[in-house]
């Protein structure tokens, strides 16, 4: 019976906390802007086939490098394709790479990190060494290697970005698990004879959530820029599929004739990653126990 | 201290050994016949067979690995596809990237730490907000794009700086800095943004800490309080951040060298993979992995020197 | 007013003087004497790719030939009209009646760049190395040579197993470069310290970055050489190359990308030179390459391989003029044949053959229908992941879409693409060839059954007979007839669909004079220098 009471007091504080977090969030205009813009990009990515006025590969050989007009709000590129449509379609690659690579990294890194931090001992040492080996290979080289072995594609770029994010996330998860295992409620659960798995899932993981969410909002913009880099180098999305990085690579040859072709995708990358950064900053702020507002 | 160092060095050695195996297998996993990569326009089967034999590619894998690693330990990393010694290429090109990285860290630290301290001290004021905003922009802007724009403006249009390339410091000290200025700025921007935020947050922490209040109560000048404690805290922060950002710095160096056509180590790695130059790639990635482990080791040592608590308790920042 | 005779005579005299003066000035302008170029200085050339080993026996890259031009003279060279002229030899080879013995006279009193004497014995040593060194790339190029003699210091005699008309052309390329026997005998890797006869000699090299040559004190014609040194910088990104030229970091730019040519043509500090090359770019169609290069060929069964209708429709759907305009800014030379218009062989071998540079969409649609294949599809492999290849792929995709052929584009890293092409794992491959002076060099290897570059897996016994005959014949007239017949077969069966001949553009700063580029696309700077 004491145990049931303990759980109900655990649930209520959570709901109360969520309300508090929401109030704090609404007091931060920058974070709200970040959330709105990020959601806009995600919406564009999902609904690109519906929103975009043209298909991403619809060429028009009689309207090369056209300036903005009624038919083409941002003009056309070197093959007569509508730039606005390609930016909207390109959001898919960036969001997909950004979000999925982070989710992949989390899925791999969090369990490993928790195990390393919770159990310590020899398993911690082994994981630490393997993490070091992973760190010794810069993500760009891993991406190039993957592109070389499996062929360049968005999927392989996403995997490479995920691998690149894993070591840092393992360290974060490990650090959190290390701290949380000393918490009273964890000790209480151990004393009560709860299984390791139950403890990890019910007590450790939920209390790491805020840190993990913040880490995700930091990793996503890095992955968005990373995808642009890889596509720019020809290692990610392959033309004719649009991606902001591919558009920048194509624009490089036309910088003297039509510099706007490089400006639009650059701004898109900037705004997209900025929105996630603002969101992340806001979340970090509201989760911080020292915040008063 | 000695035991700590020994343990760390031992761990580093294991990592290097494991990395060498990963490199070897990874390179072999690249698709296609390396003989074709060395063949360019001529793909006569007799020539291909001769290439395969001269590079030992027709022997079993473990034999190839042992042969390679035993030669590597003696400093012989073999000949690349141009028949040039890999070791010589690495020794010539590595210092260039080290110089670039050093300048980037210098630029990033100078801007980042300074901005962070100012922002913390003038918390809530305009300078804080603008510094924070700039850091946010620096984090969000794609740096290679920034580099491209800078080349157009400063090199091609204004002719203030060279568009690409490199001259050695010994030959032309001024030219050397001219060639590396934009790349260092581009590479250091990301680092400065992260450093600015971390420094600001660390400074804010310490400025409200008890021992600072005590120092103020004791009557120490504000400048001394900020200076002494700011310095201490920022060194720890800088070391930590650099340690964590090393991977990003190396990846950033690869693309910076690509855009500015700097004959450094990063671009060497990229080219080696693209050209399927197996011998060169193996040597380069092995050196890179070893170098990274060594630098990490140094960073850990530096961190422990600055933060005695780590040394004493044996716990690490890992 | 009365015009006096005197006045007319005076005016005539003045006019004559002015005309004479103008003529003199014009003459002086066109004959820019060597005295206008000052001695000394370093010329920096931005190369588009990196040369491989600097060893003529092993070298394979096109761009390596540019560096060799300055440091490794050959028995023969090409002049600006791509005729073969003697360089280290003193005359074209004397060929015996049975075409199996070539007698070549070489120069006297010439030194290698290590001071040792150049002579017929050195030529013999080099040719034997080319034929016997393990991994020699030259061996297959001069394989008909059975032995070499050097009866005296200025005479070389080549004994052939079978007649081989492309031989002299081969001796005008890397197979004709002569290496210093002293450097060869010293052991070690020749590529790390190459020594030949040349206006410049090797100084140093950093892999992936640059190659430095310095003026040779041993060269027999060194009075004509002005520069103190040449630095070849490897700059693979075409946009960076152009920026470097505009910023003054380099003085010569190799192969300007088409999108930069108009900009540089407007730049008054830079002269843009054009070289119509002897190479081609096109699509290799996999017809019979099922088991790999030089293995038994059998039809691979794809839509485009089994149906000649689809192949013809594919060709008819392509508008070569539009491809040239959209992808290359109109700067290349659209064509349907492997031999380039700039070659003296072009006109006679393509006389009467139909080549439509525009698309015939209706014909293509009819052919697709007639093929009986519903929804034909072709997978197009591109030999690179760069933007130019991407543009080409997408334009082709659009054009084929309009006639009902679905094309999927696969950008592939170049070496991997070559690998797949040899293995036969492709439908169509967008690839080119840098071109050889002799038509055999642009045709045989790709479509003859034993051709070492026959990725198409094409085998046609009539074509083989024609091409082998053309190799053995030494008469231009009979070779012309044979190659024309060969072109007809190739054009009908389409193992390769030729799209254009690259026109290369080079940038040279106006501060430098004497840089020449011929149709072989190689940058010649041996007598170049900075203007006064």
Image: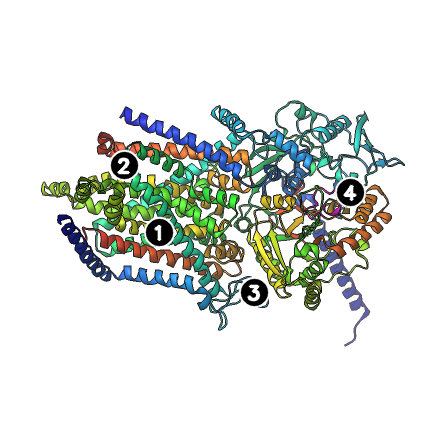
Report the front residue among C185 and B71.
Answer: B71
Residue wearing tag 2? A119
Residue wearing tag 3? A59
- Which mark is in front, 3 or 2? 2
Q: How is the image coloured?
A: rainbow
User: Does the segment drawn in magenta span residue C455?
Assistant: yes
**Image quarter of the N terminus of chain C:** bottom right
| Element type at mark 3 | loop
- Residue B182 circle label: none
Asked if residue B238 shows in the view, the reply is no
CA distance for labels 3 and 1: 35 Å
Q: State whether the magenta stretch is mostly helix, strand or loop.
A: loop
Seen in the picture, residue C94 relative to C437 is either above or below; the reply is above
- Mark 2 burial class by Cα count in 10 Å: few <14, some 14-19, many 20+: some
| 3 or 2: tag closer to the N-terminus | 3
- Mark 3 burial class by Cα count in 10 Å: few <14, some 14-19, many 20+: many
Q: Badges 3 and 1: C-beta atoms under 8 Å apart?
A: no
CA distance for labels 4 and 1: 60 Å
Q: Badges 2 and 4: C-beta atoms under 8 Å apart?
A: no
Pointer 4 chain:
C
Report the front residue among C195 and B3.
Answer: B3
CA distance for labels 4 and 3: 46 Å
Residue range highlighted in magenta = C446-457
Tag 3 and tag 2 share a subunit: yes
**Image quarter of the C terminus of chain C:** top right
Tag 4 and tag 1 share a subunit: no
Residue wearing tag 1? B139
Residue wearing tag 4? C84
């Amino acid at each position: 019976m004491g145990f049931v009471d303990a759980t109900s007091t655990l649930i209520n504080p959570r709901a109360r906390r969520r309300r508090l977090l929401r109030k704090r969030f609404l007091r931060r205009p920058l974070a709200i802007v970040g959330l709105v813009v990020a959601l806009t990009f995600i919406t564009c990515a999902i609904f690109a086939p519906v929103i975009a006025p043209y298909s991403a590969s619809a060429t028009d050989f009689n309207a090369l490098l056209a300036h903005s007009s009624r038919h083409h709000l941002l003009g056309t590129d070197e093959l007569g394709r509508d730039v606005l449509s390609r930016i909207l379609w390109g959001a898919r690659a960036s969001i997909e790479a950004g979000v999925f690579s982070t989710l992949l990294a989390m899925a791999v890194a969090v369990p490993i990190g928790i195990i390393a931090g919770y159990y310590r001992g020899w398993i911690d040492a082994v994981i630490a060494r393997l993490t070091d080996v992973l760190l010794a290979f810069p993500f760009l080289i891993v991406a190039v290697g993957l592109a070389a072995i499996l062929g360049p594609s968005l999927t392989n770029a996403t995997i490479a970005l995920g691998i690149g994010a894993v070591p840092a996330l393992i360290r974060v998860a490990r650090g959190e698990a290390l701290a949380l295992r000393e918490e009273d409620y964890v000790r209480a659960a151990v004393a009560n004879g709860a299984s390791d798995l139950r403890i990890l899932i019910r007590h450790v993981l939920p209390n790491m959530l805020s840190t993990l969410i913040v880490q995700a909002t930091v990793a996503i913009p890095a992955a968005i820029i990373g995808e642009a880099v890889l596509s720019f180098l020809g290692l990610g999305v392959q033309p004719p599929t649009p991606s902001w990085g591919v558009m920048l690579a194509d624009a490089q040859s036309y910088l003297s004739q039509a510099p706007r072709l490089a400006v639009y995708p650059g701004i898109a990358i900037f705004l997209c990653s900025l929105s996630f950064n603002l969101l992340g900053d806001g979340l970090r702020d509201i989760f911080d126990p020292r915040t008063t507002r | 201290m000695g035991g700590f160092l020994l343990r760390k060095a031992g761990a580093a050695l294991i990592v290097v050994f494991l990395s060498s195996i990963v490199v070897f297998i990874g390179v072999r996993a690249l698709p296609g016949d390396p003989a074709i990569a060395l063949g360019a326009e001529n793909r006569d089967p007799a020539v291909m067979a001769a290439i395969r034999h001269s590079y030992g590619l027709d022997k079993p894998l473990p034999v190839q690995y042992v042969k390679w690693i035993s030669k590597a330990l003696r400093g012989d990393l073999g000949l690349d596809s141009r028949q040039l010694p890999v070791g010589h290429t690495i020794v010539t090109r590595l210092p260039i990237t080290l110089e670039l990285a050093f300048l980037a860290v210098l630029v990033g630290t100078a801007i980042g730490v300074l901005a962070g301290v100012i922002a913390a001290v003038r918390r809530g004021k305009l300078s804080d907000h603008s510094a924070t905003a700039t850091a946010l922009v620096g984090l969000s802007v794609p740096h290679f794009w920034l580099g491209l724009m800078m080349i157009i403006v400063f090199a091609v249009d204004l002719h203030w700086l060279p568009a690409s390339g490199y001259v050695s410091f010994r030959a032309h000290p001024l030219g050397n800095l001219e060639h590396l200025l934009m790349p260092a700025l581009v590479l250091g921007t990301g680092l400065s943004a992260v450093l600015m935020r971390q420094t600001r947050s660390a400074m804010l922490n310490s400025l409200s800490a008890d021992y600072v209040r005590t120092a103020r109560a004791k009557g120490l000048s504000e400048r001394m309080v900020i200076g002494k404690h700011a310095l201490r805290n920022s060194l720890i922060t800088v070391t930590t951040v650099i340690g964590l950002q090393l991977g990003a710095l190396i990846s950033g160096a690869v693309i910076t060298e690509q855009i500015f056509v700097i004959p450094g180590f990063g671009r060497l790695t990229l080219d080696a993979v693209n050209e399927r130059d197996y011998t060169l790639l193996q040597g380069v990635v092995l050196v890179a992995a070893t170098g990274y482990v060594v630098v990490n080791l140094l960073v850990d040592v530096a961190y422990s020197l600055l933060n005695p608590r780590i040394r004493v308790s044996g716990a690490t920042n890992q | 007013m009365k015009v006096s005779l005197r006045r007319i005579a005076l005016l005539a005299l003045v006019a004559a003087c002015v005309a004479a003066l103008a003529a003199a000035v014009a003459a002086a302008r066109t004959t820019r004497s060597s005295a206008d170029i000052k001695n000394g200085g370093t010329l920096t050339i931005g190369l588009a790719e990196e040369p491989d080993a600097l060893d003529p026996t092993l070298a394979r890259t096109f761009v390596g030939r540019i560096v060799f031009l300055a440091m490794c003279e050959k028995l023969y060279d090409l002049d600006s009209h791509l005729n073969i002229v003697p360089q280290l030899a003193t005359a074209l080879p004397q060929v015996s009646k049975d075409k199996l013995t070539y007698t070549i006279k070489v120069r006297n009193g010439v030194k290698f760049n290590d001071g040792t004497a150049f002579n017929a014995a050195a030529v013999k040593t080099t040719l034997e190395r080319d034929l016997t060194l393990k991994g020699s790339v030259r061996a297959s190029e001069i394989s008909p040579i059975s032995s070499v003699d050097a009866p005296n210091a200025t005479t070389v005699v080549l004994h052939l197993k079978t007649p081989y008309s492309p031989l002299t052309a081969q001796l005008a390329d890397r197979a004709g470069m002569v290496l210093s026997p002293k450097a060869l005998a010293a052991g070690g890797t020749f590529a790390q310290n190459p020594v030949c006869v040349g206006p410049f000699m090797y100084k140093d090299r950093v892999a992936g970055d640059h190659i430095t040559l310095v003026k040779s004190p041993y060269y027999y014609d060194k009075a004509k050489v002005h520069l103190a040194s040449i630095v070849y910088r490897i700059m693979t990104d075409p946009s960076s190359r152009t920026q470097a030229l505009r910023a003054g970091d380099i003085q010569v730019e190799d192969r300007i990308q088409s999108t930069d040519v108009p900009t540089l043509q407007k730049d008054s500090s830079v002269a843009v030179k054009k070289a119509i090359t002897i190479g081609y770019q096109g699509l290799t169609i996999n017809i019979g390459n099922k088991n790999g290069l030089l293995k038994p060929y059998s039809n691979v069964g794809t839509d485009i391989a089994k149906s000649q209708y689809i192949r013809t429709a594919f060709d008819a759907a392509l508008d070569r003029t539009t491809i040239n305009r959209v992808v290359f800014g109109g700067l290349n030379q659209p064509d349907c044949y492997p031999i380039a218009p700039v070659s003296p062989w072009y006109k006679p071998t393509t006389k009467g053959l139909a080549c439509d540079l525009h698309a015939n969409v209706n014909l293509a649609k009819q052919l697709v229908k007639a093929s009986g294949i519903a929804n034909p599809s072709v997978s197009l492999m591109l030999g690179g992941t760069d933007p130019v290849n991407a543009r080409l792929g997408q334009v082709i995709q659009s054009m084929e879409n309009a006639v009902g052929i679905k094309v999927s584009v696969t950008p592939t890293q170049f070496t991997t693409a070559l690998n797949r092409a040899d293995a036969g794992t492709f439908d169509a491959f967008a690839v080119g060839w840098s071109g050889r002076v002799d038509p055999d060099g642009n045709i045989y290897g790709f479509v003859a059954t034993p051709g070492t570059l026959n990725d198409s897996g094409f085998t046609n016994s009539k074509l083989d007979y024609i091409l082998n005959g053309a190799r053995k014949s030494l008469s231009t007239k009979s070779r012309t007839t044979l190659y024309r017949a060969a072109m007809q077969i190739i054009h009908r069966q389409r193992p390769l669909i030729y799209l254009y001949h690259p026109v290369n553009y080079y940038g040279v700063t106006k501060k430098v004079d004497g840089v020449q580029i011929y149709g072989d696309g190689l940058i010649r700077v041996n007598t170049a220098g900075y203007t006064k």
